Image (spheres, helix red, strand yellow):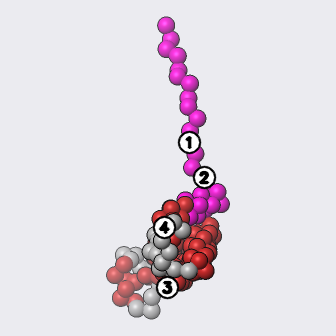
Amino acid sequence: MVPRALPSRPRLRLPRGRAADAALAGAVLVLVAVGSLRSLIGDREESWEATALGWALLVAACAALYVCRRHPVPTAAFVLAATIAYYLVSAYDGPLMVAFVIALYTVAAGAGSARRSSWPHSVCCSPEPARCSATTTSTASPCS
């Protein structure tokens, strides 16, 4: 008797591309919004105008993560500015710093891949001949 193969279960696929960017921005927004609900519930520590401005900064910083992979440095600068403004304006401490940490990680991840791809050229094409001869064993120049 030949054993039957079990039916395969459909695999869960993680989003890619812009869908992954939207999922990341949405997940961070949910996390930050849940952590900042104290500004809407309970006793007031600030005016409603300050609360509305704080929430606008919170949403803008999280929404900027949608373009973080395509434009990491300007996005990180914007998220940093929005985070600083949020903490200066709001009397409540929400977890908005998470958005900046993710933006900063994206900058570092992009810089790391660019650094790895240009590493031999930047090391061996320096004006100091000692650096190039110390890193290569052949007499041919890797810069050509």
Quick one: SS at disc 4? loop
Q: Which residue is mark 1?
A: 12
* Earlier-in-chain disc, 1 versus 3: 1
Mark 3 Cα-neighbour bin, 10 Å: few <14, some 14–19, many ≥20: few
Residue at the spot of label 3:
88
Separation of marks 1 and 3 at Cα, in angstroms? 42 Å
**Residue mark closest to the camera, 1 vs 3:** 3
Mark number, residue 42: 4
State the extent of the magenta-drawn residues as a range.
1-29
Few, some or many C-alpha atoms within 10 Å of disc 1 (few <14, some 14-19, many ≥20)? few
User: What number is the disc on residue 100?
Assistant: none
Identity of the residue drawn at 51% across and 66% down: 41
For this orientation, the residue located farthest to the front is 43
Determine whether 81 is above or below 55 in the image.
below
Q: Amino acid at mark 1?
A: Leu
In which quadrant will I find the C terminus?
Answer: bottom right
Disc 2 secondary structure class: loop
What's the distance in space between the residues labelled 3 and 2, CA to CA?
35 Å
Q: Position of residue 104 (x, y in %)?
A: 48, 74
Packing grade of label 2 (10 A; few <14, some 14-19, many >=20) is few
Task: Report, in whole angstroms, how far the alpha carbon at label 1 lies from the one at label 2.
Answer: 10 Å
Could you tell which of marks 1 and 4 lies nearer the N-terminus? Answer: 1
Q: Secondary structure at mark 1?
A: loop
Tell me the kind of residue under disc 2: Pro
Q: Is residue 7 one of those drawn in magenta?
A: yes
